Amino acid sequence: EPWTEEMRREIEKSLGLKAYDIYGLTEIMGPGVAYECKEQHGMHVNEDHFIVEALDPETHKPVPDGQKGEIVFSCLTRKAFPLLRFRTKDIGVLDRTPCACGRTFVRMSKPMGRTDDMLIIRGVNVFP
């Protein structure tokens, strides 16, 4: 589950450690799809396993890097049940500019919202 920056700072202060974001999905292999480096300027996507795109939620066409879009993944290494353009419903931004840490994998922002916020309450789909 996502945390706020205030929660992160409190954890770091209380435990005397540096806390990093990791992005993962139940539907996609673990331990994570993307992870923060020491620079903490976005999460590097494991591009040796995934192709990541940001799509316009209305048209489903790719948006330029730096523009908000729905994050979708294609998995390169799943064999039994490959995922192609899996729609996460998470809104985020991709960044391919060089990272100070030296890694070359694309970075993604923390989720900035969702294309839908459906809840299941007593077996009923509710869209607040």
Image: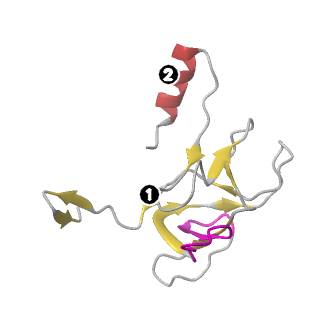
Q: Amino acid at mark 1?
A: Gly
Q: Is the stretch drawn in magenta largely helix, strand or loop?
A: loop
Q: Residue at x 23, y 61 (%)?
A: 128
Q: Which of pointers 2 and 1 lies earlier in the amino acid sequence?
A: 2
Q: Quadrant of residue 126?
A: bottom left
Q: Position of residue 50 (x, y in %)?
A: 67, 65
Check whether the beta carbons of the residues at disc 2 and disc 1 lie within 8 A of each other.
Answer: no
Which label is found at residue 10?
A: 2
Write down the quadrant of residue 117 in the picture: bottom left
The residue positioned 15% from the left and 62% from the top of the image is 123
The range drawn in magenta is 65-84
Q: Residue at x 47, y 29 (%)?
A: 7
Which residue corresponds to mark 1? 113
**Residue 109 picture location, percent across and down:** 60, 53
Q: Is residue 119 above or below residue 54?
A: above
Residue type at mark 2: give it. Glu
Q: Is residue 18 left or right of residue 89?
A: right
Q: Is residue 115 above or below residue 62?
A: above
How many C-alpha atoms fall within 10 Å of the one at disc 1: few (<14), some, or many (≥20)?
some
Q: Secondary structure at mark 2?
A: helix
Name the side, left or right, on which 35 lies relative to 81: right
| Residue 69 is covered by the magenta coloring | yes
Task: State the quadrant of the N terminus.
Answer: top left
In x, y percent, where is residue 26? 46, 56
Name the residue nearer the viewer: 87 or 127: 87
Q: Secondary structure at mark 1?
A: strand
Residue with the most extreme right position: 102
